[in-house]
Amino acid sequence: MDSIRIQGRIALQGKVRIQGSKNASLPVLAATILTGDVSVIRNCPRIADVHSMVSLLKSLGCSVHWQEKGLVIDSSQVRRDEMPEDAVTGMRSSLCLLGALIGRCREVIMEHPGGCVIGERPIDLHLSALKQMGVEFTEKGNKLMARVSGLHGTKICLPFPSVGATENIVLAGVMADGDTILEGAALEPEISALCRYLCCCGACIEGQGTGRLVIHGGRKLRGTEYTVPADRIVAGTYLFGCIGVGGCVLLEQAPGKEMAAVLNTAEQMGGHVYCTPEGIYVQAPIRPAPIRIVTKPYPGFPTDLQSVALAVETMGRGCSRIDEAIFENRFRILEDLDKMGADTCQKDSHSVLIRGVEMLHGASVCAKELRGGAALVVAGLMAEGETVVSGCSYIYRGYENICRDFRELGARVVSV
Ligand code: UD1
């Protein structure tokens, strides 16, 4: 089931429920290690990255199982074992286990984490912040060894609001002696989601949702029940999907408040968007108006939705420009879009011009990373004829069931 077959040109209608957030659930799952107790994580998406995180937690001695009410994790028996190499290198979010294990065990040996191939993705900001908290690192080949005897709070200034580094500082900070004052923290809603979980467990973190977090360390944590918020990136994928394909849909439970930049772009494309307590209603324009996007840290336009916006604009009413300011290798879908009849021109590793064409046509294309793969599915829905997207294991890392969701909206799409 590594491919998705799509018959395009069917306008989307109806409603679809938005799954729990990948980027919120993975750090929360890592954080369960800190409690040494039982946590129940509700609305956790059943995606490949969550399954990988579950394997990692089990390899560390946690007992983990799915129940109807959610994922139940007992971290009372955590060991300091080395984690399976595949699970660490296959998923960037394994990096949050660094902060969590330093907090719990004071010692970690892990591979350099992987994730989608979208640029170099260094971890210098993580290492430098943790060093300031007393952690010593040694690197041997691809292996990273961390050890700390006196984990202590301190003042840390991040030169760039890295999401992953902020998460690691929070995870280590709640277990450190004293206060950690973090200036330049990432503002992404997934950071607040992690802080909310930790505070439910007994931690004290001030300044949530701002660039200055004060983490009061050293409190005893306990397990809790927690509900993962809806996935703003999945909601954005389906929202732009509707604008590209046409139609009118309700994205149930979509977190409209966290999607201001995305909704603004959708309106610039000519979509009508209404946020209600039920979710987001979207009505597509006849053909999208051209746009100019620059990806930015939250609350700017998310890098994770750049590819799908790009796919939509291949059939826009004019010339669009997209600048990718976060990662340097995030236009890997251009070749496949051009194969479908798109007219794109990459100026450099950070910017692309898109001249809208009247119609895309179906083709055999190949997903090379998670969000780019989802964008190819959207392009297939927009195109005349049949599109087959191979390499879909990337897509299943982040989307529970993209075929089922688009079928709920009337699309003809199956995994094969
Ligand atoms: C990034 C996105 C996040 C998205 C996730 C998954 C931003 C700011 N972050 O988070 O919204 O959900 O990808 O696709 O949009 N960097 C360093 N050194 C470090 C860490 C990061 O130079 O130690 C650089 C990266 O190379 C990159 C930028 O900072 O250019 C963003 O990194 P960061 O926010 O840490 O990335 P993720 O946590 O993966």
Image (cartoon, rainbow, N blue to C red):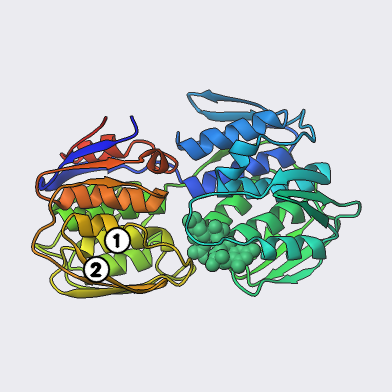
Residue denoted by label 1 = 334
User: At 34% across and 36% down in the image, what residue appears?
Assistant: 401
Taking the spot 30% from the left edge, 53% from the top edge, the residue there is: 375
Between marks 1 and 2, how big is the CA–CA gap? Answer: 7 Å
Disc 2 marks which residue? 344
From the viewer's perspective, tell me whether residue 82 is left or right of residue 232: right
Position of 258 relative to 399 (above/below): below
Ligand number 1: quarter of image:
bottom right
Q: Amino acid at mark 2?
A: Thr
Amino acid marked by disc 1: Leu
Q: Quadrant of the N terminus?
A: top left
Q: Which residue is outermost to the front?
A: 141
Residue 136 image-quadrant placement: bottom right
Residue drawn 80% across and 62% down? 131
In the image, taking residue 37 as reference, residue 232 lies left or right, namely left
Q: Is residue 300 above or below residue 377?
A: below
Q: Is residue 202 something one can see in this rendering?
A: no
Q: Is residue 255 left or right of residue 222?
A: left
Give the x, y percent position of residue 148. Answer: 87, 52
State the image quarter where residue 184 is shown: bottom right
